[in-house]
Amino acid sequence: MYPNLYFLIRDIFGVQLSGLQLVNTFGFFVALAFVGSGFVLHSELKRKEKLGEFTAIEEEIIIGAPATWGELATSLIFGFLFGYKLVGAFLVEGALSNPPLFIFSSQGSMGAGILVAAVMTYLKWKEKDKVKLAVPEKKRLLVWPHDRVGDIVLQAALWGFIGAKIFHNLENLNDFAKDPWGSLIAFSGLTFYGGLIVGGISVLYVAKKKGIPFLHMLDVGGPAMMLSYGTGRIGCHVSGDGDWGIVNTAPKPNWMSFLPDWMWRYDYPNNVNSVGVPMPNCIGEQHCNHLDPMVFPTPFYETIMALILFAVLWSIRKKLKYGGLLFGIYLIMNGLERFMIEKIRVNTIQDFFGLKLTQAEIISTALVL
């Protein structure tokens, strides 16, 4: 397992780049998931625009205006934070021994923060100054839905993360009560359905504001979210973030005999949560634990299932005539897949009107219905 990219690059290339400890492997694959979903959204929006299901709206922009104080202040603030924290991580002794703690502490490099802030502020001013006109002009341009993919993905990422955090802490209220601040700032502890619900609502809000038809926007989002889910689960598996299955002591079935043993049960060595028992010959490093007994590698199973379901959605998307139908099929597929995997997956049990269910089982059932 590779808790962060430092371990991955070290094992593959033999190069030790300490700064890569700041790049969590799970977060890296989540970023790839958003890139992939953005590509799918862009492709589908353009296709539906040609079919006449989406139209452009006219917006007014100003050409040739100098950089505003707000733009310069934003560049200065983000530049300072980037230099103070990310550059500072390489300069402050011991910063990378606990990256999450360092990121949310007051430690950093003041000199690097000021330098990067000055450079980014200057670049923003220079960018605007190059196209500055003596008298700024107003122009009206047609903006198509596919031109808004960047904004849509950004909204989904931001609100999806917030939703995933909220739902995770609702599911684990005892842990949250013990350490509220630690639970909120931890890089781990995300619930997919929280991200799906809150992120989805935010995207639909943006779509409504920009005059994008509701049902057709849902159809565009279904395949994108399925692909994103499958890609994100790769990060769960590779980092060993705790989304694994229950203990599996059963012998590997004969029909799986040609597959590697880890596809049946796995011990998640060097998992990012440092859960399990100490590994032999692993001294002086972080993340030296593995699971004993071994468990079902459920993130791997979900990756395979989600990518297959994405392929199904992608193959039928042009054959469906009614808006919202593809998204309905997505909800059923998503709900069934998640409900089934919950039977062999570690999760918190909820008391739901006398029934012992997980949060995901409740939500997945609602999605199917």
Image: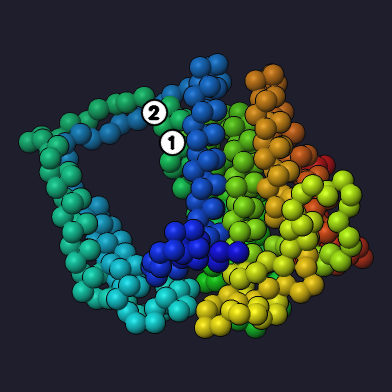
Q: Which residue is mark 1?
A: 148
Q: Which residue is mark 2?
A: 143
Which picture quadrant has residue 288?
bottom right
Q: Nearer the viewer, residue 319 or 207?
A: 319
Residue 22 appears in the figure: no
Real-space Cα separation, disc 2 to disc 1, in angstroms: 8 Å
**Residue 235: image x %, image y %?**
59, 56
Mark 1 surroundings: few (<14), some (14-19) or many (≥20) residues within 10 A: some
The type of residue carrying mark 2 is: Val
**Residue 15: image x %, image y %?**
40, 64
Q: Residue at x 68, y 66 (%)?
A: 268
Residue 59 vertical placement versus 258 (above, below): above
Q: Quadrant of the C terminus?
A: top right
**Residue 101: image x %, image y %?**
47, 78
The answer to the question of whether label 2 and label 1 lie on touching residues, with beta carbons closer than 8 A, is yes
| Residue 210 appears left or right of 141 | right
Q: How is the model colour-coded?
A: rainbow
**Residue 321: image x %, image y %?**
69, 19
Looking at the rendered structure, the secondary structure element under dot 2 is strand
| Residue 64 appears left or right of 58 | left
Q: Residue at x 50, y 55 (%)?
A: 28
